[in-house]
């Protein structure tokens, strides 16, 4: 529907795709040329495959109807105003630590993620929309952390007495996630500027003010 609308009114169309198109990657870090390793019938496949087919449709409209598309593959993003119950790992840990609850780590916490502060992501999206590069382009922070490292950092910043509890790793949970942002640097002159500790400090302050 939105692609059809963009075609009719000759609008520039932004597809907010996701690093989930890479599935549980066996290439590290992930470049845009990597075609992914997705279990198409797994419990998380509707999201992965939904975004993959959205990219397919966007590029078909670009090729067939000359729709002016932009495709961003967004990696883990965090920051103020996240919902406290959205199920994302940063908000989960921050809320649990502020409430004095144990931090829930899945598996051994050895799986890695790359966390991009929201204002960095917004800057990347604006540069993508204002430029001529169609994409897909990875937008994320290439600094890679294990989930256990993230838990320990948040634990240390909020309440070092907080316990960590370990639960079984969900099926098809990606073991590694790190963007190769060469394209973003080359075509958008973009790379993240806010390191994890600084971004977490601002995020924790926001959650603290809302939860109190």
Image: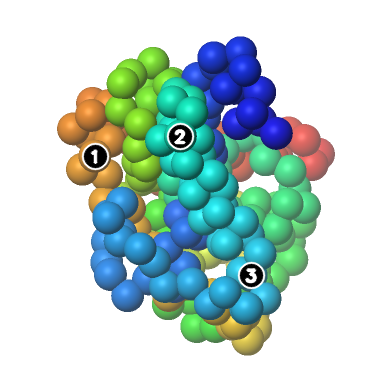
Task: Look at 30% across and 61% down and name the residue there.
Answer: 34
Q: How many marks?
A: 3
81 relative position to 30: left or right: right
* Percent coordinates x, y for residue 154 in the rendering: 53, 56
Q: Classify mark 2: helix, strand or loop.
A: helix
Say which mark, if any, is on residue 183.
1
Residue at the spot of label 3: 44
For the residues marked 1 and 3, what is the alpha-carbon distance in whole angstroms? 28 Å
- Which class describes the residues within 10 Å of circle 3: few (<14), some (14-19), or many (20+)? some
153 relative position to 29: left or right: right
For the residues marked 2 and 1, what is the alpha-carbon distance in whole angstroms? 25 Å
* Percent coordinates x, y for residue 87 in the rendering: 70, 58
Labels 1 and 3: the sequence-earlier one: 3
Q: Badges 2 and 3: C-beta atoms under 8 Å apart?
A: no
Say which mark, if any, is on residue 64.
2
Closer to us: 118 or 157: 118
């Amino acid at each position: 529907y939105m692609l059809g609308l963009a075609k009719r009114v000759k609008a520039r169309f932004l597809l907010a795709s996701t690093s989930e198109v890479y599935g549980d990657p066996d290439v590290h870090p992930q470049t845009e040329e990597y075609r992914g390793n997705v279990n198409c019938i797994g419990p998380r496949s509707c999201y992965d495959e939904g975004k993959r087919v959205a990219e397919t449709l966007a590029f078909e409209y670009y090729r067939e109807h000359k729709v002016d598309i932009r495709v961003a593959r967004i990696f883990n993003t965090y920051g103020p105003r996240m919902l406290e119950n959205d199920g994302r790992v940063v908000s989960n840990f921050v809320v649990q630590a502020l409430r004095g609850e144990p931090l829930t780590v899945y598996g051994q916490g050895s799986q890695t993620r790359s966390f991009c502060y929201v204002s960095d992501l917004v800057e990347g999206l604006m540069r993508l929309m204002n430029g001529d590069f169609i994409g897909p382009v990875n937008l994320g922070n290439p600094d890679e952390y294990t989930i256990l490292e993230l838990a320990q950092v948040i634990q240390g910043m909020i309440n070092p007495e907080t316990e960590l509890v370990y639960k079984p790793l969900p099926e098809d949970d990606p073991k590694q996630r790190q963007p190769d942002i060469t394209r973003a640097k080359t075509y958008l002159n973009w790379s993240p500027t806010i390191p994890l500790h600084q971004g977490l400090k601002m995020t924790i302050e926001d959650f603290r003010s809302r939860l109190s």
